[in-house]
Image: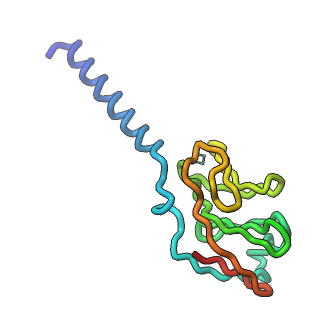
Amino acid sequence: MDRKEFLTTIGVGAVAAFCSSCLAACKPLDPMVNSPTNVDLTLNLSDPAYSALNSNGGSIYVDNIIVARISDGSYVALSSICTHQGSTVSYNEKTNRFVCPTHGSIFATNGAVINGPASNPLLSYKTTINATSLRVYS
Ligand code: FES
């Protein structure tokens, strides 16, 4: 192997290795693997850690779940892990949507994708409120 052949071979190998790692990094996450399942949490809304949920538009994070109070007595709980590449989504009170800051995916309050690049919905969880106890469950 002469010098030119060697460099060509090394160059092709390096490009192949680089592209392989890029493709692996860009592979969409499987929301069933990465999002919380078998969820059953009870949040005490008297606890200062959850006080944001006492106001419309407030939201908190717990165990990779985002819980938002979207109106009086109405709560939504979704996986906070974006199904595109795993960034943490946030709740936008003004649009009543969940948004990912990394690439701009937008999700409805039921977790459905409104705008990509994410193509899979966020897992959603049921909520029930009883006085100051908010239950979030699968
Ligand atoms: S990580 Fe890419 S849109 Fe959320």
The location of residue 84, given as percent across then percent down, is 55, 48
Left or right placement of residue 71 versus residue 100 in this view: right
| 63 vs 45: above or below | above
The location of residue 117, given as percent across then percent down, is 58, 42
Identify which residue, 97 or 17, lies in the foreground: 97
At horizontal 65% and vertical 74% (from top left) the residue drawn is 126
At horizontal 70% and vertical 60% (from top left) the residue drawn is 109
At horizontal 39% and vertical 39% (from top left) the residue drawn is 21
The location of residue 14, given as percent across then percent down, is 32, 29
| 14 vs 71: above or below | above
Identify which residue, 85 or 94, lies in the foreground: 94
Residue lying at the far left of the rendered structure: 1
Write down the quadrant of residue 115 in the picture.
top right
Left or right placement of residue 91 versus residue 33 in this view: right
Left or right placement of residue 65 versus residue 12 in this view: right
Write down the quadrant of residue 110 in the picture.
bottom right
| 121 vs 36: above or below | above
Left or right placement of residue 138 versus residue 8 in this view: right
The location of residue 108, given as percent across then percent down, is 69, 56
Instruction: Tally the marks.
Output: 0
Write down the quadrant of residue 136 in the picture.
bottom right
How is the protein colored in the picture?
rainbow
Assign the C terminus to one quadrant of the image.
bottom right
At horizontal 63% and vertical 51% (from top left) the residue drawn is 113
Identify which residue, 42 or 109, lies in the foreground: 109
